[in-house]
Amino acid sequence: ETGVTQTPRHLVMGMTNKKSLKCEQHLGHNAMYWYKQSAKKPLELMFVYSLEERVENNSVPSRFSPECPNSSHLFLHLHTLQPEDSALYLCASSQEQGYGGTEAFFGQGTRLTVV
Amino acid sequence: GQNIDQPTEMTATEGAIVQINCTYQTSGFNGLFWYQQHAGEAPTFLSYNVLDGLEEKGRFSSFLSRSKGYSYLLLKELQMKDSASYLCAVVDSNYQLIWGAGTKLIIKP
């Protein structure tokens, strides 16, 4: 248990579906992140939130839409995804935005399959 | 561009020692992390190096040479539960994390 909880753990969705991934952290951290992890590729940073404000969006397609209603919760809304979006989506949090010596804590991820 | 290189896969024997290397080319350097990730699980923090030298933490040690853009993770007295992927990540000049693709470590009895 890392203090970061993601639901669901597994998700299969069609290309026309709309679904949402949820992340919750109980660590009192101020920054939260969405990452995409594909097989044999580096973690790809998608979005960064600091104190509920989006501070980074790494050229992510608009079919991915993040939401951060408060500092403990982070959502990733999905719609009209493509098969190449199938991956493990990881949520992480850290005390502050930026990584000057403070580690990030990760959730177990949502394994997403787009059919 | 920024680049982190680590071997894709390594195999080692239970009870032995293994060294996982990581080389990096980044815009600036503000530290290097090692994470462990078991299949289907969250990456978990192992170590953080910002100064040159060896940091020892039980069976695991991490080494850094900033002049060579090089780090390694040393695992001693390997156990079956050490089978996992090991991720190297560098903090660049903007305090962003640049990740390697990870090294899958397979431990054989």
Image: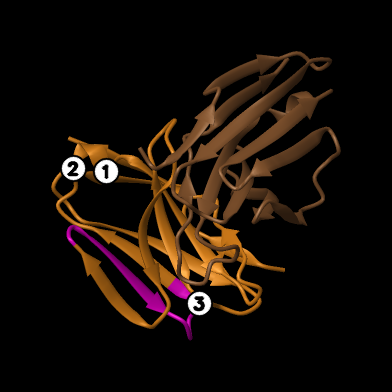
Chain colours: A brown, B orange
> How busy is the neighbourhood of tag 3: few (under 14 within 10 Å), some, or many (20 plus)?
some
Tell me, for residue B82, which label it has, or none.
1
Residue B78 counted in the magenta span: no
Q: Is residue A82 left or right of residue B8?
A: right
Q: Is residue B60 left or right of residue B23?
A: left
User: Helix, strand or loop at disc 1?
Assistant: helix
Q: Amino acid at mark 2?
A: Gln
Q: Amino acid at mark 3?
A: Gly
The answer to whether mark 2 and mark 1 are in CB contact below 8 A is: yes
> Which tag, 3 or 2, sits closer to the chain's start?
3
Which chain does the residue under circle 3 lie in?
A: B
- Which residue is drawn at the image coordinates 56% and 78% (left, top)? B29
| Quadrant assignment for the N terminus of chain A | top left
**In the depicted view, which residue is nearer to us: B16 or A37?**
A37
User: Helix, strand or loop at disc 2?
Assistant: loop
**Placement of B18 over or under B107, stated as above or below:** below
> How busy is the neighbourhood of tag 2: few (under 14 within 10 Å), some, or many (20 plus)?
some
> Which tag, 3 or 1, sits closer to the chain's start?
3
